[in-house]
């Protein structure tokens, strides 16, 4: 049985999840809060491909800690993740720590936001946006 490790965004505990059970809205084994809904998930080489598969739209923020626009956009991304809870999955992928994935998707500028459906990129936008513009763009993609 193939699995992935996902860090709980609430208590920071690592949880092992069987990939075929991702659709079941799993909860953290320690704090019992949802693992894949309502808060951005940390994307890694170990979990990224499994998280973007399936019919749940997945919104990925490719960012870096040294990037001021990325840091400024982070609260917008987090608020939007809460707003779209149950409608889409949100992932933050640190391009410095996960450079292999950033190279795979040819990330040249950050922040870059991509929407995936069924493992395929269906939309991309570059740059930090105000929340109203971001949600307007996102509504068009979902």
Image (spheres, rainbow, N blue to C red):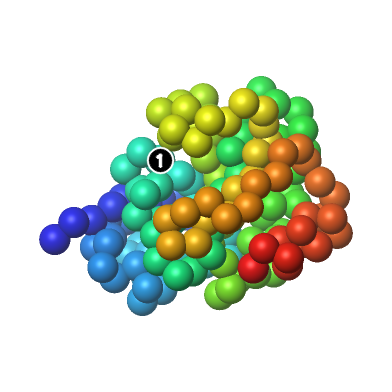
Vertically, is 28 above or below 65? Answer: below
Which residue occupies 59% across, 38% down? 62
The location of residue 57, given as percent across then percent down, is 53, 64
Closer-to-camera residue (130/136): 136
Which residue occupies 81% across, 46% down? 129
Residue 14 seen anywhere in this rendered image of the structure:
no
The location of residue 55, given as percent across then percent down, is 45, 70
Q: Residues within 10 Å of mark 1 (few under 14, many from 20)?
A: many
Closer-to-camera residue (52/7): 52
Vertically, is 106 above or below 122? Answer: above
Which picture quadrant has residue 31? Answer: bottom left
Which residue occupies 73% across, 67% down? 139
Quadrant where the image shows the C terminus: bottom right
**Would you name the residue on which mark 1 appears?**
44
Q: Secondary structure at mark 1?
A: loop
The location of residue 20, given as percent across then percent down, is 26, 68
From the viewer's perspective, is 56 left or right of 29? right
Vertically, is 21 above or below 53? Answer: below
Closer-to-camera residue (131/139): 139
The location of residue 10, given as percent across then percent down, is 51, 57
Residue 112 seen anywhere in this rendered image of the structure:
yes
Which picture quadrant has residue 46? Answer: top left
Quadrant where the image shows the N terminus: bottom left
Which residue occupies 50% across, 36% down? 105
């Amino acid at each position: 049985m193939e699995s992935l490790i996902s860090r709980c965004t609430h208590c920071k505990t690592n949880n092992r999840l069987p990939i075929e059970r991702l659709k079941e809205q799993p909860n953290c084994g320690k704090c019992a809060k949802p693992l894949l809904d309502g808060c951005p998930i940390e994307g890694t080489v170990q979990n990224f491909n499994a998280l973007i598969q399936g019919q749940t739209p997945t919104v990925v923020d490719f960012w870096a800690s040294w990037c001021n626009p990325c840091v400024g956009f982070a609260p917008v991304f987090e608020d939007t993740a809460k707003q779209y809870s149950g409608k889409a999955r949100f992932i933050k992928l640190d391009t410095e720590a996960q450079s292999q994935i950033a190279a795979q998707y040819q990330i040249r500028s950050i922040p870059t936001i991509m929407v995936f459906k069924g493992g395929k990129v269906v939309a991309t936008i570059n740059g930090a946006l105000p929340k109203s513009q971001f949600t307007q763009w996102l509504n068009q993609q979902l």
